[in-house]
Image (cartoon, rainbow, N blue to C red):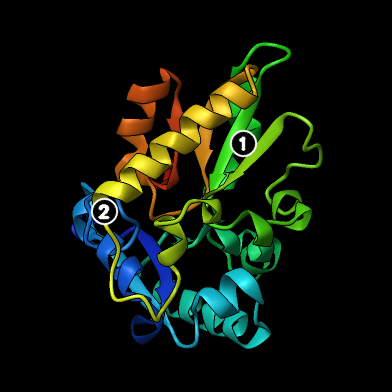
């Protein structure tokens, strides 16, 4: 029998010293991927040297990718049964990371999109709320098994003023009340612009603390990083 006190899930996170102040505020919220209180079970979080907004979101870095592979192997040797990451933009590395080890690897909440679409009726779509639309490419989706983007609408939070400060290391902090307000606005805007939307998928692992607010405001299901990691944890 397994030992339930040992982490089954390993999480690859950004290097601590490279996390902007605004993002550090979000990390303190229950529901955030790197907050241990977000889980009803033990997880193992490993910080990846050099992993940051620049090397993961804006310009994916090969050296950082190789460091992730090394850390995954270390975690597996310590008993971890599945591995995820603290940033949905690692979807671009999904195939390579999964091919490098012998346990399930799920890099991004975007991997839920094919499942969510199958739960909706013909003609309905999924709205993705992402931290930075400008960096979310078709390759990110393709590596998550999504070849057809026609039923996927993308809302980028960088268009909102307060959220736009989150990844800026020069900004000392953000207004969390405004952040929540902006994310709700994004959900309502998606529903207004795309009446066929039947559910939301939140790309960003810093957004699950606001999932309940989006559900309440829009009346639609919201799938996020926490819904995914809970699912995999039960599986392993």
Task: Give the residue drawn at x 57%, y 83%.
Answer: 64
> Which residue in the structure is indicated by mark 1?
113
Front residue (pair 47, 56): 56
Front residue (pair 118, 233): 118
Front residue (pair 4, 142): 142
**Whether residue 222 is situated above or below residue 161 in the rendered picture:** above
Q: Horizontal and vertical percent for residue 24?
A: 29, 69
- Visible in this render: residue 78? no
Task: Give the residue drawn at x 26%, y 65%.
Answer: 25
- Visible in this render: residue 79? yes
Task: Give the residue drawn at x 36%, y 24%.
Answer: 217
> Which residue in the structure is indicated by mark 2?
176
Other-residue count near label 2 (Cα within 10 Å), few / some / many at <14 / 14–19 / ≥20: some
Q: SS at mark 2?
A: helix
Q: Horizontal and vertical percent for residue 200?
A: 52, 32
Q: Horizontal and vertical percent for residue 115?
A: 60, 30
Q: Horizontal and vertical percent for residue 141?
A: 71, 49
Front residue (pair 96, 57): 57
Task: Give the residue drawn at x 39%, y 35%.
Answer: 184
Q: CA distance from mark 1 to mark 2?
A: 28 Å
Other-residue count near label 1 (Cα within 10 Å), few / some / many at <14 / 14–19 / ≥20: many
Q: Is residue 1 left or right of residue 145?
A: left
Q: Is residue 96 left or right of residue 64?
A: right
């Amino acid at each position: 029998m397994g030992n339930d006190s040992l982490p089954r899930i390993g999480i690859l996170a950004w290097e601590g010293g490279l996390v902007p102040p605004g993002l550090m505020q979000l990390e303190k919220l229950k529901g955030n991927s790197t907050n241990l209180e977000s889980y009803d079970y033990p997880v193992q979080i490993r910080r990846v040297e050099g992993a940051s907004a620049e090397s993961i979101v804006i310009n994916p870095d090969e050296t950082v990718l190789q460091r992730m592979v090394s850390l995954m192997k270390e975690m597996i040797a310590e008993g971890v049964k599945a591995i995820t990451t603290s940033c949905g933009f690692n979807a671009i590395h999904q195939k390579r990371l999964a091919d490098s080890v012998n346990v399930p690897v799920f890099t991004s909440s975007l991997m839920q999109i094919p499942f969510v679409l199958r739960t909706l009726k013909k003609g309905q779509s999924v709205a993705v709320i992402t931290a930075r639309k400008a960096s979310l490419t078709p390759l990110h989706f393709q590596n998550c098994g999504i070849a057809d983007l026609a039923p996927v609408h993308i809302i980028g939070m960088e268009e909102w003023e307060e959220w736009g400060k989150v990844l800026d290391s020069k900004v000392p902090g953000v207004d969390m009340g405004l952040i929540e307000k902006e994310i709700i606005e994004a959900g309502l805007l998606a529903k207004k612009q795309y009446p066929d939307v039947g559910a939301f998928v939140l790309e960003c692992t810093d957004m699950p603390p606001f999932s309940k607010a989006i559900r309440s405001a829009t009346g639609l299901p919201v799938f996020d990083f926490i819904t995914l990691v809970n699912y995999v944890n039960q599986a392993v």
